[in-house]
């Protein structure tokens, strides 16, 4: 069973922008991971009122990687100049994810971060 990390943009697509079932059904045989920071960004961006019964249901579909002091410190050293991108990448490696799915071209250009392959979608990338 593959472990797949969703970058914030893809996480928001999965729970808000696109029909949730499309993205999540494509990942049904995988462990789907996301960062605590992605949940924060989603709530802040879309002004989600808490408590949110719908968000509580959606979050249970993911393994949420905690934002630890270690991830924060590693994120301050790179690999990119963007702290949030670095948190996402380090969170994926912390969770030992096989794939990291993103729409961010700068991250896609990296191709790999540690053992985690960076891709734009699942097409031709199933493990």
Image: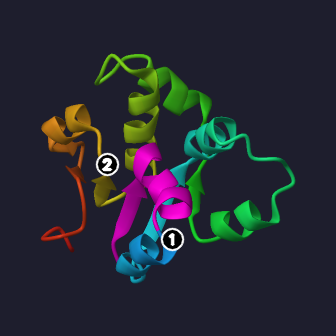
Label disc, if present, on residue 105 of the rendered structure: none
Residue depicted at x 75% and y 46%? 48
Q: Does 17 appear in magenta?
A: yes
Q: Disc 2 marks which residue?
A: 102
**Precedes in sequence: disc 1 or disc 2:** 1
Q: Helix, strand or loop at disc 2?
A: loop
Q: Does 99 appear in magenta?
A: no
- Residue 19: give x, y in percent of width and height: 48, 71
The region drawn magenta spans 1-18
Q: Helix, strand or loop at disc 1?
A: helix
- Residue 54: give x, y in percent of width and height: 74, 66
- Residue 119: give x, y in percent of width and height: 21, 53
- Residue 13: give x, y in percent of width and height: 46, 56
Residue depicted at x 38% and y 75%? 27
Query: Which image quarter: residue 97?
Result: bottom left
Q: Disc 1 marks which residue?
A: 20
Of tags 1 and 2, the one toward the viewer is: 1
């Amino acid at each position: 069973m593959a472990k797949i990390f969703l970058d914030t943009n893809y996480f928001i697509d999965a729970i808000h922008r696109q029909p949730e079932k499309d993205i999540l059904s494509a990942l049904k045989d995988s462990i789907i991971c996301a960062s605590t920071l992605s949940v924060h960004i989603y709530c802040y961006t879309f002004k989600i009122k808490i408590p949110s019964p719908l968000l509580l249901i959606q979050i249970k579909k993911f393994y949420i990687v905690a934002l630890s002091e270690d991830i924060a410190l590693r994120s301050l050293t790179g690999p990119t100049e963007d702290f949030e991108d670095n948190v996402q990448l380090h969170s994926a490696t912390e969770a030992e994810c096989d794939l990291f799915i993103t729409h961010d071209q700068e991250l896609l250009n990296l191709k790999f971060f540690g053992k985690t392959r960076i891709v734009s979608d699942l097409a031709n990338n199933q493990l």
